[in-house]
Amino acid sequence: KEAMDKMMAELKQQQKQEYEKWEFCKKEIDQTEDSIKVETHTKEDLDEKHADLVNTIDALQRDIAALQEEEHQMMVALKQAGENRKAENALYQTSISDQRATINILNKAL
């Protein structure tokens, strides 16, 4: 009987230890699952933010390219306007010179 009581006490002790281990493992699994859920949501949020940033970068690169093209077109237009002014000034100077020559001829004729 004493041996049976000893065995029962040992079995109860083992059962208690196994139950405590089971509770510990259950708690750890729950914490791990919660942590996985939190990290999964964080990853999804970061993936979404990454996609937004990539789209923003692409849009800004397109805007930069468009502005550079616009700047190039403005530089071409500015150069063309300068050349047009130079040609118009040459025509103006020729007209003034011709008018002065005409005035001199008319003054000599009078």
Image (tube, grey):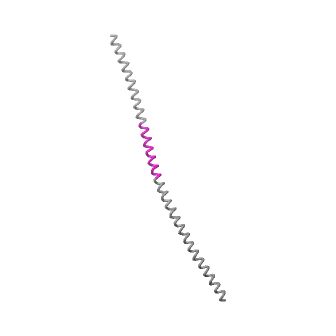
Q: Looking at the picture, does residue 78 appear above or below residue 30?
A: below
Q: Looking at the picture, does residue 12 appear above or below residue 55?
A: above
Q: Main secondary structure of the magenta part?
A: helix
Q: Position of residue 78 (x, y in %)?
A: 54, 66
- At a point 44% along the width and 48% down the height, the residue shown is 51
The N terminus, quarter of image: top left
Residue furthest to the bottom in view is: 110
User: Is 49 within the magenta?
Assistant: yes
- At a point 51% along the width and 63% down the height, the residue shown is 72
* Most foreground residue, 98 or 32: 98
Q: Position of residue 14 (x, y in %)?
A: 36, 20
- Tell me which corner region of the image, top left, top right, bottom left or bottom right, holds residue 27: top left
Q: Position of residue 71 (x, y in %)?
A: 52, 62
Q: Looking at the picture, does residue 75 appear above or below residue 53?
A: below
Query: In the displayed structure, does residue 43 sit left or right of residue 76?
Result: left
- Tell me which corner region of the image, top left, top right, bottom left or bottom right, holds residue 83: bottom right
- At a point 35% along the width and 13% down the height, the residue shown is 6
Q: Looking at the picture, does residue 25 appear above or below residue 5?
A: below
Q: Position of residue 17 (x, y in %)?
A: 38, 21
Query: In the displayed structure, does residue 14 sit left or right of residue 53?
Result: left
- Tell me which corner region of the image, top left, top right, bottom left or bottom right, holds residue 79: bottom right
Q: Which residues are magenta?
A: 36-57
* Most foreground residue, 50 or 91: 91
Residue furthest to the top in view is: 1
The C terminus, quarter of image: bottom right
* Most foreground residue, 57 or 17: 57
- At a point 55% along the width and 72% down the height, the residue shown is 84
